[in-house]
Image (tube, rainbow, N blue to C red):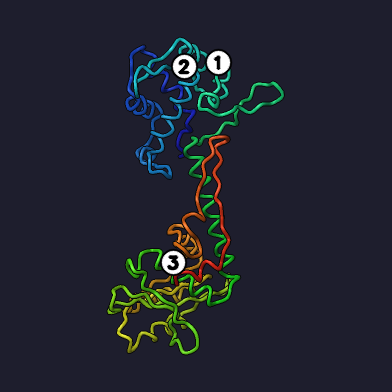
């Protein structure tokens, strides 16, 4: 069952305050949640920031009511209903939506929050109703933009030469913290590489190593069991028992089953997870730099955007 939208909390919040007493925000949220008969599962839902969804939505409902002068803040986190609020609740006892707030003279939340209200040939602007709060809309936009950047990254990795891909893989692992503070990792792929494309030294003397294999394959050309077996075979005589196999495509079920069953610890990372890791760790000085992928929040229109620096040559720095 879908959780109530943020506007669903407005009428319950006003009913809580209708006794004329001063109520703290926490009590308003809990009473409104009780009135809406939220299930334990709905109460446990969170938004991307980690805040409980019902708390976030009720808080925004209270904020909108405040900007509509339906309630008034008495002190920080404490509210009381106004006559405007009583009238609003009497007019819409079964539920209040944002369009109902437009009936109140002077209501303009965008102006109150330092934003310019859109103009529409002199007509009053009624925002499109949505069940998402501004926080949730921002989180949704960030998720969408992150997915788009990850997809573009994967496309570019597949389009470059194998040497570039191998360097990118080592860069990702170093960016994740492997190799220690000194970033001890190198590409060793090429003729006679013995089935290993890179090595990460976990200690200064190289006593603890992680072997890396990278396969730049097109989408749909998945890595099979035989390839994973060959990678494990390359460990023989090297005193290494851990490895990471990364591909820009994916792995067959047989390859995953073999990796899970073999005594050597092998981690398989497919293209989707690789792109996600590159975005998450920002791969300092390499494919992505912290300054290259940053979110900018603009209060004018609540727009989020990423600035993407496309510079494959950056990969050659520091590896």
Q: Which residue is mark 3?
A: 172
Q: In 3D space, how far apart are the residues under numbered discs 1 and 2 (Cα atoms)?
A: 9 Å
The answer to which of 6 and 73 lies nearer the viewer is: 73
Q: Residue at x 47, y 31 (%)?
A: 6
Q: Is residue 52 above or below residue 172?
A: above
- State which quarter of the image contains the N terminus: top left
Q: Which residue is mark 1?
A: 104
Q: Which residue is mark 2?
A: 70
Q: Quadrant of residue 159?
A: bottom right
Image disc number at residue 174: none
**In front: label 3 or label 1:** 3
- State which quarter of the image contains the C terminus: bottom left
Q: Residue furthest front?
A: 317
The answer to which of 89 and 239 lies nearer the viewer is: 239
Q: Residue at x 33, y 75 (%)?
A: 201
Q: Is residue 233 above or below residue 156?
A: below
The answer to which of 178 and 42 lies nearer the viewer is: 178
Dot 2 or dot 3: first in sequence order is 2
How crowded pointer 1 is (Cα within 10 Å; few <14, some 14-19, many 20+) is rated as: some
How crowded pointer 3 is (Cα within 10 Å; few <14, some 14-19, many 20+) is rated as: many
Q: Quadrant of residue 26?
A: top left
The answer to which of 7 and 208 lies nearer the viewer is: 208
Dot 3 or dot 1: first in sequence order is 1
Q: In 3D space, how far apart are the residues under numbered discs 3 and 1 (Cα atoms)?
A: 54 Å
Q: In 3D space, how far apart are the residues under numbered discs 2 and 3 (Cα atoms)?
A: 52 Å
Q: Position of residue 258 (x, y in %)?
A: 40, 77
Label 1 SS: loop
């Amino acid at each position: 069952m879908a959780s109530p939208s943020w506007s669903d909390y407005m009428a319950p919040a006003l009913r809580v305050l209708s006794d004329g007493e001063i109520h703290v925000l926490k009590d308003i949220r809990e009473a409104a949640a009780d009135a809406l008969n939220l299930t334990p599962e709905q109460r446990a839902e969170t938004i991307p920031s980690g805040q409980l969804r019902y708390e976030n939505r009720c808080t925004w409902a209270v904020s909108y009511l405040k900007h509509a002068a339906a309630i008034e803040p008495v002190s920080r986190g404490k509210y009381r209903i106004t006559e405007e609020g009583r009238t609003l609740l009497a007019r819409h006892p079964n539920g209040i939506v944002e369009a109902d707030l437009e009936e109140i003279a002077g209501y303009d939340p965008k102006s109150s929050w330092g934003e310019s209200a859109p103009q529409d040939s002199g007509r009053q602007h009624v925002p499109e109703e949505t069940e998402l709060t501004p926080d949730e809309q921002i989180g949704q936009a960030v998720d969408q933009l992150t997915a788009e950047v990850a997809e573009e990254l994967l496309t570019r990795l597949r389009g470059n030469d194998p040497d570039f891909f191998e360097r990118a893989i080592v860069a990702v692992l170093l960016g994740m913290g492997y190799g220690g503070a000194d970033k001890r990792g190198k590409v060793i792929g090429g003729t006679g590489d013995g089935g290993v494309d890179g090595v990460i030294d976990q200690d200064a003397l190289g006593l603890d190593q992680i072997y890396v294999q990278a396969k730049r394959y097109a989408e749909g050309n998945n890595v099979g069991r035989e390839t994973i077996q060959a990678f494990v075979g390359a460990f023989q005589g090297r005193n290494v028992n851990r490895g990471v196999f990364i591909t820009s495509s994916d792995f067959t079920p047989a390859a995953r089953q073999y990796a899970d069953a073999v005594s050597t610890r092998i981690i398989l990372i497919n293209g989707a997870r690789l792109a996600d890791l590159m975005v998450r760790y920002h791969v300092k000085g390499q494919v992505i730099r912290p300054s290259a992928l940053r979110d900018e929040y603009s209060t004018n229109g609540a727009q989020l955007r990423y600035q993407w620096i496309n510079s494959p040559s950056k990969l050659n720095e520091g590896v």
